[in-house]
Image: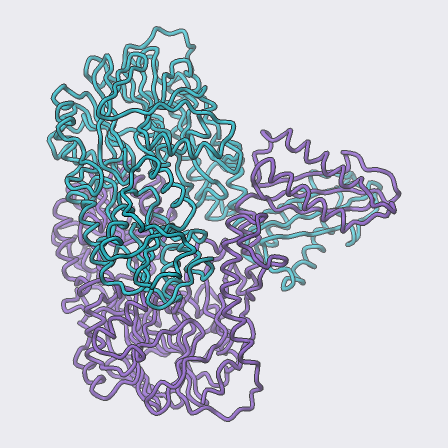
Chain colours: A cyan, B purple
Amino acid sequence: MDNIKNQFTKRSITPITPPKNHSSSSANPLLTPQEKKLIAKLQHHRKKNTRLSSSHPRKNHNHPLSKNLKIIALGGFEEVGKNCVAIEYEHDMILIDLGFQFPEKDMLGVDYVLPDLTYVKKNIRKLRGIVISHGHLDHTGGLPYLLPQLKHVPVFATQLTCDLIKKRLEEFPDVTASLKPIRPEQDKIRLGQFSIEFFRVNHNIPDSASVVIHTPEGTIVYSGDFKIDFTPAHDDSADLQRIAAIGSQKVLALLSESTNASEPGLTISEREIGENLNIAFSRCHGRIIIATFSLLLSRIQQIINSAHKLGRKVTFLGRSMLQNFEIATKLKYYKIPRGILISPKEINKYPDDQIVIIATGSQGQESSAVGRMALGEHRFVKLRKGDTVILSSSPIPGNEKSIYTMIDNLIRQGAKVIDDKSMDIHASGHGSITDLKLLITLLKPKYLIPDHGSLHMRAAHAQIGQDLGMPEENTIMLDNGQIAEFHRGQLVSTKGKVPSGLVFVDGLGVGDVGNIVIRDRQQLAGDGIIVIIAQIKKENSPSDESNIDIISRGFVYMKSADSLMKELKKKALNIVNHRGENGQLDLTNIRNHLRDDIGSFVFDRTQRRPMIIPVTIEI
Amino acid sequence: MDNIKNQFTKRSITPITPPKNHSSSSANPLLTPQEKKLIAKLQHHRKKNTRLSSSHPRKNHNHPLSKNLKIIALGGFEEVGKNCVAIEYEHDMILIDLGFQFPEKDMLGVDYVLPDLTYVKKNIRKLRGIVISHGHLDHTGGLPYLLPQLKHVPVFATQLTCDLIKKRLEEFPDVTASLKPIRPEQDKIRLGQFSIEFFRVNHNIPDSASVVIHTPEGTIVYSGDFKIDFTPAHDDSADLQRIAAIGSQKVLALLSESTNASEPGLTISEREIGENLNIAFSRCHGRIIIATFSLLLSRIQQIINSAHKLGRKVTFLGRSMLQNFEIATKLKYYKIPRGILISPKEINKYPDDQIVIIATGSQGQESSAVGRMALGEHRFVKLRKGDTVILSSSPIPGNEKSIYTMIDNLIRQGAKVIDDKSMDIHASGHGSITDLKLLITLLKPKYLIPDHGSLHMRAAHAQIGQDLGMPEENTIMLDNGQIAEFHRGQLVSTKGKVPSGLVFVDGLGVGDVGNIVIRDRQQLAGDGIIVIIAQIKKENSPSDESNIDIISRGFVYMKSADSLMKELKKKALNIVNHRGENGQLDLTNIRNHLRDDIGSFVFDRTQRRPMIIPVTIEI
């Protein structure tokens, strides 16, 4: 019954290969801790891959079509980001969301990480379309890079989401998207054997939707990012009636997001944030500079409202803030009181207590508007005593240090700083335990598949399902690449696997930077590089010091390492002039010795392991 | 009166120099965002330095002795870590604490960061001794590296602190320390004109002391890290009577730690943690593996007590855990029930519900005991369903990602994980707002100098002082390097400055890695390196492709970049064979063109900026 599983065991675009000659890295004293760490990771991945490819040998394609409905976890099941799920039945497949992930700190030089779509590309003839739940980059960011490989199939999303995707694609002139706006309350679309509708949910970007996929084997609901806000600021509340109605028609499986599955209670309401912003604003006597996410449109509307109440003018600073303000204005999203908007150049025409500046920089980015103010480098705004900077946001994990550095610099410039630790001036867009319970209770799915989160978040979410009375085996934990197969309303297998490597975007390259390149970067980052260029005479006469050049970067401040460099040169010369017993010139052997002997020597003297590159030139 | 200030404007060991040719980095389109960020930092530092050196030209040393008491902020005033303060009066100087800091994520390859002691070394004849408040590395870690430069002056600390320093110094055979154990309740020491006593405080390492320095100009109290625990688990409570008595004798200035100055209330008591551990343990039916800080001796005692209550055996895993257990045992710190300790090899001899393993790994370190268990690589412990891993600790900022990766892997191995988010099983060692208020109220200092923390933490602490009625000008905010001078019970200046750069430890090198090396490492980390080796014929005959070698590392996976490399070679050959109008061979010019033209070409094609190193060899 699961004879189709694992037919594709081909490796991902960026093959994860273990380094040569290291069967057991943890015992190898020649490796740095960094290298050991990387190798351990690689082995972990390899184990997963090996197990699969050995137990499920590649089969040819001419098998009878499986009658199983497949939910394929492609991304967002072992991380926060690069969300992507495929749903497949017979000749038809759709993708839901196609996000990217920001790189982990050891993925040096990588811009973004994409989900591995090897399986989808192999089955491209089945792909009927891509459905996007909302406009955040962890749900849309993969489109510019992957649409061309997916034959530009149509993309279905709400109006704002379509507009945001379109805006981003302007930077990719070669990519055209066939964008199909849908209205969550009214539209039903048909893609192959799938009939798809939507319902409205709350999130910290408007026009967020959950996706309902009716299949011949049952109905699947994909929550996307959501929270239940009974008193949203500017949107309508999530459509609980409609959700309940869908739940009353039997839901086979709910894929639901796990970001805040460990947070107790119901996520704080956006309107409460608005009230707190009013309080915060009323305490300020100078200029107010407020940073938030540029796509948090309802927050920005609330800020405008608070400003209006106090008779303050409003201006916007920062590229993405201006860009998204423009998009939202076109969609008539904002209600802007007449005469409240001013241009950044007019800031100094008004008294300090009549100014509100809405700016980018809530994550401590140095190139953002508030980031530049913190460094005293902003064109229009020089901070001074009396200014208040409000960060109406929370740190995205990993950004804490940059944010606190920025706060320190803001204080140094004389500003007072209010962040979400000092006051409830930010609400998460993700549902907490009660929100998640509410969705499960309204939909009454037979199976719960926690998605959008790494293992511990999804495990907490599975526990919530079990706390609501679901049997443990009905809360399905999938890894990236894993397939859940259903037949006649029953889960029949989770053993199938498709490739699930990491695809790195670096500059213009998609997938051309793999683990070998990253490992080199890690070594270069840790201890730099030494290049030894040796000119070796063909005739059997010895080289002298003028034939040896040593160049290093990132290793040691060269002027203070004069004697070390002299010793290195001497050592290299010895190696070069030591010919084998038969007097034959063996360049490979010389290069090996240069690398290994100089490497050990440098380590003994400095406890550092720069990359050593020997170059031999016969003259 | 402050004629002594800024006499030393010499740069720190690691000079912060701006990169060449970039007067305004933010506008320069040739720079990567990473480079711009670094340059902005450098310029920020430079501005600070320039201002000082220009307004206070270097003076000679033969000035009349200042009668001012000086408190010199050497480290821990712009960061968490490398705590160090100098107190100077006439011919006498002492240091309090000498810690190191763990590197920020952009300090690639750096092991530790030390405070800049240029000023102390210049005045080494004044230095009477070093007083250490407690045994954590942010207070002691600089000793092995800096004691030799400080003529091995005596070091005063409590017994446990001395023992921990001694243990660490075993790894530095060339460093000898003259360690002088002191008893907080009884000993008073005299160093020059300073008379010094101590009082006991609570912290998450035993034998922590605050330092009271009686000077001819008044009494200074240095809190060190502390909290007020009315019900500590195994230590005595902080000695409030003694603190009050010191406060009744007029305190000129209080240097007090700011780590938790934004946390409301009183820090949770250690005994409450013990009770929660009892509850957590009683819910476990399999093995308990518990990770905590190896120096949190009172926590470890509570874990032993909880294990004893349930009839479980206890064993220890992890190098630092074993090492510090040994030290604490020698000091008779622990009360170990007879027969409770077993060796790691005996774990499998007992039923699962009779085992408690106390292990390293609370910060997600992959090489720690729990870290290896998470990867399935631990020699003695293979995790399985039924095991519970308890992290009785909180993440040190920056470690969050590693910890959650470890938790994910622990869950994957089948274990249940309890961390301090799910239960109150860890108490910070640092005082919250109420603790800080209590110390200020008991000591009634005229001046408050918040230390141990970056600006926003110290600003919050200054606000606490002001909330207690201190005038704003009596809450003194110092940067690293800044001097507060007092005369006749009054603050007379905060304008003086001493060098305050960052001194990097990398392997065996102290100070030989500066910002130039770090900048190179950042470039190498981001996009790798391309080395172009061109053999150029002296006689005016053109080179051919066999004369050009191109080597790259960390740039792109070479096998997939074949055509790019061919183009590079061709381009390099063109440059090499293009001689000036007069036909002269200008190697410098060729190298410049190789670097710049190949650099632009590579950027156009890949949007990456690898470091380009041209090497020319005349043949």
Dividing the picture into quadrants, the one containing residue B238 is bottom left
- Position of B284 with respect to A122 (left or right) is left
Q: Position of residue B338 (x, y in %)?
A: 17, 58
Q: Position of residue B419 (x, y in %)?
A: 23, 48
Q: Can you say whether B494 is above or below A187 in the image?
A: below
Q: Residue at x 33, y 63 (%)?
A: A352
Residue furthest toward the front? A338
Does the rendering let one see residue B459?
yes
- What's the residue at 38%, 68% (across, down)? B76
Q: Quadrant of residue B327?
A: bottom left
Q: Number of marks in the image?
A: 0
Where residue B45 appears, x then y in whole percent? 50, 65
The quadrant of the image that shows the C terminus of chain B is top right
**Is residue A53 shown above or below A17?**
above
Residue A584, given in percent of the width and then of the height, sits at: 78, 38
**Could you tell me which quadrant the N terminus of chain B lies in?**
bottom left
From the viewer's side, name the closer residue of A601 and A619: A619
Quick check: can you spot residue B155?
no
Q: Nearer the viewer, residue A255 or B582?
A: B582
* Residue B334 appears left or right of A119: left
- Left or right, A245 with respect to A451, comes to left
Q: From what the image shows, is residue B231 above or below residue B414?
A: below
Task: Give the answer, above or below, for where A363 lies relative to B602.
Answer: below
Q: Depth check: give the residue in front, A536 or A241.
A: A241
